[in-house]
Image (cartoon, rainbow, N blue to C red):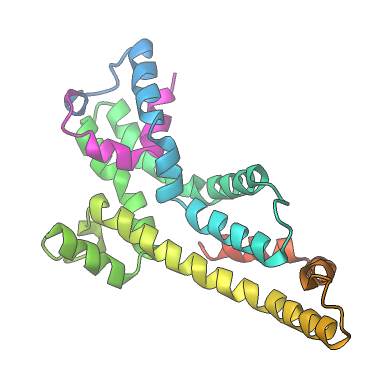
Amino acid sequence: MRLLPIAFALLAPALSAAQSLPLGTVRGASLSVPLQIVVVLTLLTLLPAVIVSVTPFLRIVVVLHFLRQALGTQATPSNQVLIGLALFLTILIMQPVAMEMYNKGWVPVEKGQLTLGQGFEQGSQPLKAFLARFAREKDIKLLVEITRRPAPRTPADLDLAVLVPAYILSELKTAFQIGAVLFLPFLVIDLVVASVTLSVGMIQLPPVMLSAPFKLLLFVLVDGWNLVVGSLVKSFY
């Protein structure tokens, strides 16, 4: 039964805070199946925060919500659809990182070659490399100053306590930049339609009602979903 290794690969940041627990002194994979289930269920309570914070889910879901607002389609697609799309794209992007974490971290622990603490240290390196790749130097510097940690010599020396919030700040900035760019063409359509309706005296008719079909038509003609999703996924490679 491999429930614990899977949790180890997905919940490295959560395990970082749990190293001081007695579990960190366990050697090998001697935990029984019931105890594995208890550990996994405990760690799974942190899974939503981990998925939202340290994966591409953050950038993807923010951009998709900006896109929906730019289209002016209100609740279509629904939040469930956008979150589901963002979740599956996140799994697609993070699968190589999770497998590398599993092979470098849990496999040696399972074979008894490393302790759980050492396995965590080895397994967290791929995640650190991923976070450091997309975290801005400015945000990392801010978090290092806030936490009063010594300046790292290399990105590998950065702790997850610094990398995770720095990554979140960087992803929010990137997502808002992409969202602003997505808004521009639809904003032009809104301005043109509003100018036309005012010039012909159609004051009582909301311009949004007339611009929505044009925005949808433009989005469909350029195959917008393919372009947006493709660009989002490629931005992480």
Q: Nearer the viewer, residue 33 or 53?
A: 53
**Residue 5 position (above or below residue 65):** above
Q: Residue at x 28, y 16 (%)?
A: 30
Q: Nearer the viewer, residue 209 or 38?
A: 209
Give the image quarter of residue 149. bottom left
Magenta-drawn stretch contains 73: no
Image quarter where the N terminus lies is top left
Provide residue 226's location: percent of width, then percent of height.
72, 62
| Left or right of 95 on screen, residue 211 | right
Q: Residue at x 82, y 77 (%)?
A: 203
**For the stretch drawn in magenta, what is the main secondary structure?**
helix
Q: Residue at x 19, y 29 (%)?
A: 24
Magenta-drawn stretch contains 6: yes
**Residue 129 position (above or below residue 23):** below
Provide residue 192's location: percent of width, then percent of height.
78, 84
| Left or right of 235 on screen, residue 156 | left
| Left or right of 80 on screen, residue 43 | left
Give the image quarter of residue 40. top left
Q: Residue at x 30, y 67 (%)?
A: 139
Number of disc labels: 0
Give the image quarter of residue 210. bottom right
Magenta part of the chain: 1-22
* Outermost residue, right side: 200
Residue 114 appears anywhere in the view: no
